[in-house]
Image (cartoon, helix red, strand yellow):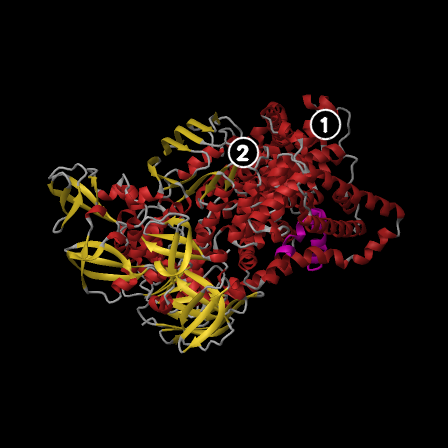
Amino acid sequence: MPKVVLERVSKRFGRITALDEIDLTLDDGEYSCILGPTGSGKTTLLKIIAGLVEPDSGDVYIDGKRVTGTPAEKRNAVYMHQNYALFPHLTVSQNISFGLTARGFEEEAARRKASEVLEIVKLGEWANAYPRELSGGMQQRVALARCLATGARLLLLDEPLGALDARLRLEVRGELSRIAEELNLTVIHVTHDQSEALSLADRLILMRNGRIVQTGSPEEVYFKPNSVFSAYFVGESVFLEGIVRRVDGRVVTLELRNGTIIEALSGDGFNRGELAVAAVRCEDIKVGGGPLTARLKEINFLGSFSKLVFELPEGLKITANIPLSRFIEEEFRIGASFQLSIPRERTRLFKQPPMGLAGEIEAV
Amino acid sequence: MPSVKVENVTMKFGGFTALDKVNINVEDREYVSIIGPSGCGKTTLLRIIAGIIGDYEGHVYVDGKLFDAKPLEERGIGYVFQNIALFPNMSVGGNVSYSPRAKGLSNSIVRTTTLEMLELMKLSERYHDYPRSLSGGMQQKTALARALASSARLLLLDEPLSLLDLKVRTELRYELRRIVKDLGLTAIHVTHDQEEAMAVSDRIIVMRRARVVEDGTPVDLYLHPKKIFTAYFLGESNVFEGNVAEADEDTALIDLGGLAITARNTGFQAGEKVIVMVRPELIELGGHISGRVLKKTLEGLFSRLILDVKGIRMIVKQPYSNVAQLGEGSSVNIRLPEEHVLVYKHPGRDLYSEISLY
Amino acid sequence: MPAVEAEKTSRFRGIGRRVISRLDKLSEEKTVAYSLYLASIVFFLGIILLPSLLGILLKLDTAMNVVTNPELLNRSFSAVFSSIIMAGIVSALDVAAGLPLAWIIARKKYRWLNIVDSLVDFPLIVPTVILGYSTLLLWCEETPFSIIGFTGVSPGFITVLLLHFAFSYPVVVRILAGKLMDIEATYEAAARTLGACPFTTARTITIPMLKSGIIASLILSFARSLSETGATIMVAGSFENGPVFIKKSIDAGLVPPMVFVSLVLIVLSILILAGLRLFGFKFRMPFRKAYRIEAALSREGVTRVRDLSAIIIFLFLVLLPACFMVLARMPLMLSYGLLGEIFTLRGAWSTYWISVLNSYVIALLTTLINVVFSLPTAVIITRRKLGGLVSRLLEALSTTSIIMPSVALGVSLSLFWGASGISDFILVLLAHLCITYPYMVATMVSVLEDIPVELEEAGRTLGGTPFKVFRSIVLPIAKYSFLSGVILTFTRSVNETGATLAVSKTFKTVSVLLVEWVKSPDMRVEAGAGTLVLMFLSIILLVIFRYIYTKGGGGLA
């Protein structure tokens, strides 16, 4: 059964360290998402599992068998490229049977199996079309079908939804998880889209600069981020820098640079006078009723929820996300004054990062 | 001041009709997005306004003046490309100063404009760097600075953020809107990302299959779409086919096949075939309709439940804390508030062809 | 009966399948792949690179004879000087005149462009010696054109210039048009929306982005002008550049001038080309301002005149010379009744047909051997199979032999292999291998570079062995451009004269024979007829080439 283990895998490209001693275990039948910004090493990791890139050091095991050095075609793991890499000179059906004939199927049997798989992805009528005649969404399904047809139980997907329109992406997301579940596949899916990772993954692996930052179920990573970066990259958070003023058991009191006092619960040992960063999910900020007085600066309507940008004294900005129902019920006027509260049980406290807060959360 | 009027524009590429008698109006200083699935003609429309594509039927007016025959370089338009298209043979400074130079402005003006724009985009330190050494986000900011340095009052944005990482994309879109509003520009922004469109624009134009479907403010289009396609394309939605079982002045009882729901009546008769749309996040917990949880996933602010309600598949979105105790197989009671159930005339054809993204 | 046949074919298929699956298996072994790479590198070093240089280097001591002889030294230097000047002028003119036509082909959309597009390839297919003879006829003999300017001008500098311009022009246009098509249209649109008129856009955006193509064109036309021998001799008259001088001294039985001039030419041209590569890529023209005149030059009337003159230059200076020979000799040939005689296989014509056969056998072998060995080399270069350094080194070295004067290459080869006493036939074959190898490798490299690596990766991870991926994905996608490379190599071999003349005494290819005929006064009409036949054969090749080329266009769309 396809269980994937990586032991101290490292890879350098010239002076750039793409992967730095990665240890990872993925269970059979699990849907894992590797999440991270561009250049975090996630694609390299996937290609190493596929056998398309050889690690400089470390080992890869699939099903308990050491496969380091085994060529890609013998790994029984199939890799799907971001831009699908469909063979332009072959029809849909020929594309799909490629992996079958390569595995020694007779032509006839391969064709039969290909049409079976085409039914799974609902493209039966397109068997004789060429890839260029298909829309982006259909090409994506052909690429998927081509992987499924090989019968490989380990599916390695590199940004499989990245080339699709935003709306189509939502539709295909559902398809993907349905197919993976029905065929009981082990899937490793690379993406930079945190909502995609949250909604698809059994296990989420967050990467940055060639290292794994955090792994766990989506709930674990979302509700218990282990670092400022993790809280920043998964979901939306407000980050508040301040000085620890008081530590009372698990309750830590933080004074922000504009003098505002907030509280957070933390198990870590914080000391008085230390710099710290508090992270709160934008949807956990209570609008209406609370000790903080803030002025509403901006309303960004995003459909299912809206972002309200509030300004505290001295220009400190806090963004609160409110669901659509609240937006409909209540009238929010720009310039109006609101009372906010930051619930301490939902606030996570982190040590001041060595490169400063901006170094951890600067996207552009 | 630039207002834009597109009148009856039709564009054909060989046998393929990219635009079919399209009319749009953009007011001065308005930020308008054009959204639609790929192939709907939105980029073609933008390129026609810019003058990159000629040979169309119909007319384009900018600021009341007929633009059809005006050469590209005399239109005074800032265009931002999806593939960014920074000149690889020039530094950031060279790129940004390109337009003032090409317009023959004096050296001192070229210099001050360039520095000003770089300052605005917080790129001053990158003056001497070449595009390939910049991250995708910075490249697109440079491209924006380059377009703004042309002192254009009309900005055309062709999927400007779609090649960037999600996190970068969400940050840049607010910056984009801020700059357009601060400088008092008119902007037309083409995108396939509905959330981006809602975040940046004053008004959204929805296109599909070479035609304009409808237009309106983000709130109007999201809450009260006139067309079922808009409802489907803009955000997630539950779309059902049904029959009006009973109807009086105020309310209509609609039979979805095994499940009957109440909606505000907007002039439907009993027996009529209709389409019903409900936003997943407006379905409430704790009503009389019972269903079973098929799947539950976390999406951030919301948890997304897929329910089986008497054989009907329904998506419900609720804040995590409300549904924390629910798991796959749990039963749950829901309510569809009648004011949020939108009813549309049935198009006659099958529903799928009405909402499909192709 | 049919059943037996079916069984037979199925048996053959079975054998074929077994062979293929055996190869599939073999290709999984890394040692097999690496021995293939090793063989191709050994071939390159042992057959192509070393012999073409060592022959000269072995006779290095004789070069002193030239240095100590002032008269010879003087003539040598003036020949080298003429070569470099000629090559410089030709490559500059090629780019200057080729760019507008390439622009029209790449950017405009007229129906008649298709015709121009196919005509551009025509001179490539016409043997260079024929082009030379044609040039001579057109500009210096009994035609209306000779009245225009060249009456009384003895064949010389200008005729060589016209000849070199004509034969390198098509390649330059092809390279530039190809590169222009690769530049995304959005860059130009971006510059235009930013307020630049078309001329300014071209000057500041397109041409700088086209730099690699321009440099490649300059290098190629420079090298071609430097090395071409056969046709140059034909039209040179009193003009003497390196190859002409080498040929004259070889004919006079003198080897030292050849060694000396070749060495000086090789060293100088390596310096010039390296300098061009080095400084050409660093050279930037900063954009200071847009000039008024640029807007004027962008006006439609002006651009029309420009386009028209580009096409006129192509028609009169390239296309007309390419086919003039046959046009001019046609009436004479008909009146002599030569056309009937050609197929009688009597006297001179039997020699002719044997030489045609010789040419085609050599060309076929050259192409086959080059395909077998340059394909793995191209794989090593593009896929970095042996590391980046080996790739770059191999790519640079593989182009060395194109800058050698072809006659010098031939002499070097015969000096190198001469001692071993191998036959003329093998020597000619070796010479043709050396001359076509760089083109073949360059074609293969560009073909392989165009195929996204993802496709190969996808094939591998779907379970295909390296050989299966190569034969079922890489080859089918590349086959059209691959075949056009093959045909180019083939025609290049048929047309070769300089090196062939140098290595072979008894074995004659058709190009060599035609040179001889053209030179002897009483065979001129026969030369015309022979050319006509050869051109017919070439046109058939051209048609095949065009067919494949247009088909190839749709291959990866």
- Looking at the rendered structure, the secondary structure element under dot 2 is loop
Counting from the top left corner in percent of width and height, residue C276 is at 70, 48
Packing grade of label 2 (10 A; few <14, some 14-19, many >=20) is some
- Is A249 placed left or right of C252 in the picture? left
Counting from the top left corner in percent of width and height, residue C530 is at 61, 34
The amino acid type found where label 2 is placed reads: Gly
Q: Is residue C414 magenta?
A: yes
Magenta stretch: give its range. Answer: C395-421
* Residue at the spot of label 1: C140
Chain where mark 2 sits: B
* Front label number (2 vs 1): 2
Chain where mark 1 sits: C
Disc ID at residue B76: 2
Count of marks placed on residues: 2
Using the image as rendered, state which of residue B312 and residue C321 is in the foreground.
B312
- Is C167 placed left or right of A69 in the picture? right
The amino acid type found where label 1 is placed reads: Cys
